[in-house]
Image (cartoon, rainbow, N blue to C red):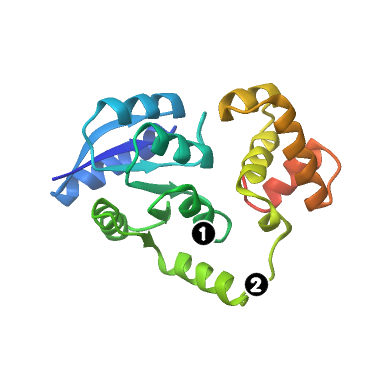
Amino acid sequence: MIRVVVVDDHAVVRGGVARILERAGDLTLAGEAADGPTALALVRSVVHDVVILDLDMPGGGLGLIERILEVSPGEQVLVFSQHAERDFALRCLEAGALGYLNKESGFETIEAAIRRVAAGRRFLSDAGQDVLLDQATGRGPGRAPHERLSSRELEIVRLLARGVRNADIAAQLGISVKTVSTHRTNALEKLGLASNVDLALYAREHGLI
């Protein structure tokens, strides 16, 4: 039996995943969390094989993948996100996740992804594999400006676009306010933008939040 921890701030999503696990027969729910701090406590205390993780929730994001691996090395993390593979799949793998799955995926794909990640193998949908091939060969659509951002810059841009204050971002990511400000300045320059309002508009236009 593969034991799964589900981390998502939407109860409907957690419930939906739980039903998929029950339907599969060889998968079971080991625990669930709605935010980053609860997820970190859960992976320390509950016996499990896979963590299914949403990116968009309090205390979440790419940094949560890294923090989970810090407190529990060897975790098998499968990111389950509404965002397109092109924007986040590679970044999640670089942060330490074993797989990336879009929330529009069907039951069979979700079950297959969990089993593959539980076995310590990487999982990407066909769309995700196409993205990696495009990036490796330089083919496919031209790069959007935000693809030039570092993973940390992108994470801070997404938080700023949601209206999170610099001090709160610093506390969430475990960095200084000055470092947040530096990343913000660099991101604005790379994107050719001037303010947090511009960041919010850009993030919404490109599906980053």
Q: In the rendered image, which quarter is residue 65 located in?
A: top left
Q: Is residue 61 visible?
A: no
SS assignment at label 2: loop
Q: Is residue 18 above or below residue 137?
A: above
Q: Is residue 172 above or below residue 199?
A: above
Amino acid type, residue under disc 2 in the picture: Pro
In front: 38, or 119? 119
Crowdedness near tag 1: few (<14), some (14–19) or many (≥20) residues, C-alpha within 10 Å:
many
Q: Position of residue 88 (x, y in %)?
A: 54, 53
Q: Is residue 4 above or below residue 37?
A: below
Left or right of 151? Residue 100 is left
Q: Is residue 192 above or below residue 29?
A: below
SS assignment at label 1: helix
Left or right of 18? Residue 163 is right
Q: Position of residue 175 (x, y in %)?
A: 62, 28
Quarter of the figure with the C terminus: top right
Q: Position of residue 106 (x, y in %)?
A: 34, 58
Q: Is residue 183 visible?
A: yes
Q: Earlier in the sequence, mark 2 or mark 1?
A: 1
Residue at (45, 34) in percent of width and height? 67
Q: In the rendered image, which quarter is residue 53 located in?
A: top left
Amino acid type, residue under disc 1 in the picture: Glu
Residue at (34, 39) in percent of width and height? 73
- For label 2, the residue is 141
- For label 1, the residue is 85
Residue at (39, 24) in percent of width and height? 38
Q: In the rendered image, which quarter is residue 99 located in?
A: bottom left
Quarter of the figure with the N terminus: top left
Left or right of 140? Residue 48 is left
Disc count in the image?
2
In front: 49, or 105? 49
